[in-house]
Amino acid sequence: MDNTKRDDIKPGDEVSIVLKKDQPTGDLTDGIVQDILTNSSNHPHGIKVRLESGDVGRVQIIKE
């Protein structure tokens, strides 16, 4: 699974994202994907998603 490829991430997946405010520290937020916000097929910094909690950030880890 590659966090930079849109096809590898689906709503309902459990992921860890980095929020915009946490980018300098690299702190991760865990949650379930509600929506995929990145339109392109890939993004070098991770696919941007909205979690069910409402948090928005780029996927760093896709949990199996």
Image: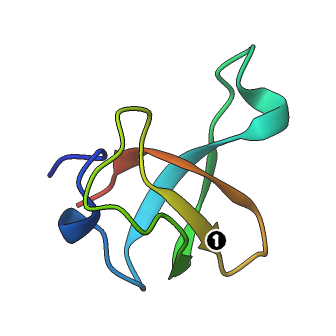
In this rendering, the answer to whether 42 lies above or below 31 is above
Q: Residue at x 36, y 44 (%)?
A: 43
Q: Is 58 displayed left or right of 25 in the figure?
A: left
Identify which residue, 63 or 51, lies in the foreground: 51
Q: Relative to the observer, which residue lies in front, 57 or 63?
A: 57
Color scheme of the displayed model: rainbow
Residue 47 at x, y = what percent?
Answer: 43, 53
Q: Residue 11: horizontal and vertical position, in percent?
A: 41, 84
Residue 36 placement (x, y as % from top left): 48, 74
Image position of 2 (left or right of 63): left
Q: Residue at x 64, y 72 (%)?
A: 51
Residue matched to label 1:
50
Residue located 55% across and 70% down the image: 37
Of the residues shown, which amino acid type is indicated by label 1?
Arg
**Which type of secondary structure does the marked residue at label 1 adopt?**
strand
Could you tell me which residue is drawn at 76 percent across and 63 percent down?
A: 55
Q: Given the current orientation, which residue lies at the most extreme left position? A: 1
Q: Is residue 48 above or below residue 17?
A: below
Q: Does residue 39 lie above or below 15 as drawn?
A: below
Residue 9, horizontal then vertical, whole percent: 30, 68
